[in-house]
Amino acid sequence: MQYTSTRGHALGSYTDVILEGLASDGGLAVPGPLPQVDSALLESWRDLNFAELATAVISLFANDIAEDDLARICRAAYDPAKFSTSEIVPVSDLGNGLTLVGLSEGPTLAFKDIAMQFLGEALDFALEKSNGVLNILGATSGDTGSAAEYAIRGRERLSAFMLSPRGRMSEFQRAQMYSLQEPNIHNLVVDGVFDDCQELVKELSSDAAFKQAHNLGAMNSINFGRISAQIVYYFWSWLRVTDAVDAHDRADFEVSFSVPSGNFGNVLSGHYARTMGLPIRKLVVATNENNVLDEFFRTGIYRPRNAANTLATSSPSMDVSKASNLERFLFDLLGSDAERLRGLWQQLGADGFVDLTTEQPRFLEEFGIVSGTSTHQDRVNTIRSVFESTQVLLDPHTADGVTVAHAHIEPGIPMLVLETAKPAKFPDVIAEALGRIPTTDEAYREMLELPQHQIDMPADPNELRAYIAEHALHARS
């Protein structure tokens, strides 16, 4: 497996890529060519448990990690003791052609746990071999931060500097992050929106000298390790849905996925799974009112919004107007032409938008990608209607996925909706939809009462540099 940057530079091995995070040229690591999975190999995975399937899928990308070591990493990541179900990712029928892929059974009740638990173990393994340390610099719109912090809390070789936007997350999300007291966890609350946090991360990560001096890395979806781990549950859920399909009809049995989308990493993982050979008919990009991605896939015009025009919505983890992982998709769309991609970003800087209207028909025809927007009232109505008909309670982001999915359901093609988080994390929206606040277990109620610790910070890269320089881990001699 060869890795390159979307900006054109050759990169190292899988381990090198996950330790580096953002490439030194400012681009994102992409594999090439993608491994191919034929029907025989896919069928041979049918009886694997989740950890075993993760080992099989990720080994196609991580060929510098011995299989026994990778299997041990995956067993530790997907230990059933960390999840509320031994299946790790349960798949259940929602009726009306919809299937729910349960991705929120991990320690922070969000889909990010699936990839973060793996990445925490994989990074620790790589650092132990090299006797190194890594300071994770990340931005979160809600769930990435807590999932990353829970995956590395208490680890001696890893620390986290996690930026979050002031007042833009739910009470539950804030409590999950800010109540952590481990010395290797640093919660930095930025005056701004998620995109401001993300720009700070990109600026420091692109500063090669500072990054090297302070051992900076990433655990958000700019890290390809996250993407590789998310590919696993696309294969897992296809295998579960097709368990009931006649063996002669399984090889080409298509399903579609509706994916609530903010930073585009989850959809990108589905795009890679489809390119690898998984029979995916459509990938439905479901956005909230910050619908930059919906506009792009409908029109071919990519027009990111500034902080002032990024709305605070009732599905806050999707309040993103500059989706980092779109760069990886554009790299594929442009035939791996890094020079043309750099030209697009220059156009974006000059004009405030990118015009790819001539390529727009390919989004569906070649890549199977469609999109749609869900509003606050849509998600409230969907939460209510799904609960009344099935007694299944959705969080607002997953409700966005269900809302947008309805327009793209086709006869005979199962529509799988990827769950984002547990509804208890967003009690105000659930109360509006159902007239009552969802119950949480005692452990989570106690968490909400814990003292919280945070560092307030302006959206200033120099202040962030100073804080990291003072608090970063450094390698031991």
Image (cartoon, grey):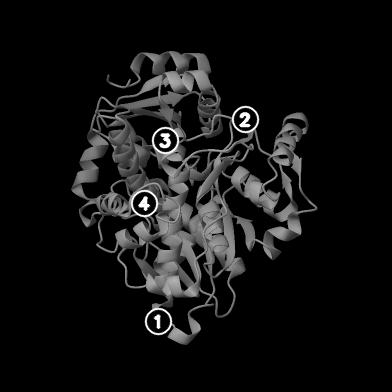
Q: Tell me the tag on residue 114.
A: 4
x, y (%) of residue 136?
39, 30
Nearer the camera: disc 1 or disc 3: 3
The foreground one among 305 and 255 is 255
Residue 432 in view here: no
Q: Residue at x 43, y 77 (%)?
A: 242
Name the amino acid type tagged 4: Ile
Gap between marks 1 and 3, in whole Å? 40 Å
The foreground one among 378 and 406 is 406
x, y (%) of residue 332?
65, 51
Name the amino acid type tagged 1: Ala
Q: Residues within 10 Å of mark 1 (few under 14, many from 20)?
A: few
The foreground one among 137 and 397 is 137
Q: Residues within 10 Å of mark 3 (few under 14, many from 20)?
A: many
Secondary structure, mark 2, is helix
Tell which circle, 2 or 4, labels the residue nearer the N-terminal end. Answer: 4
Gap between marks 4 and 1, in whole Å? 25 Å
Name the amino acid type tagged 3: Leu
Q: Residue at x 28, y 47 (%)?
A: 107
Q: Tell me the tag on residue 19.
A: 3
Q: In this rendering, is residue 77 above or below 9?
A: below
The foreground one among 381 and 278 is 278
Secondary structure, mark 1, is helix
**Residue at the spot of label 1:** 244
**Residue at the spot of label 2:** 308
Gap between marks 2 and 3, in whole Å? 34 Å
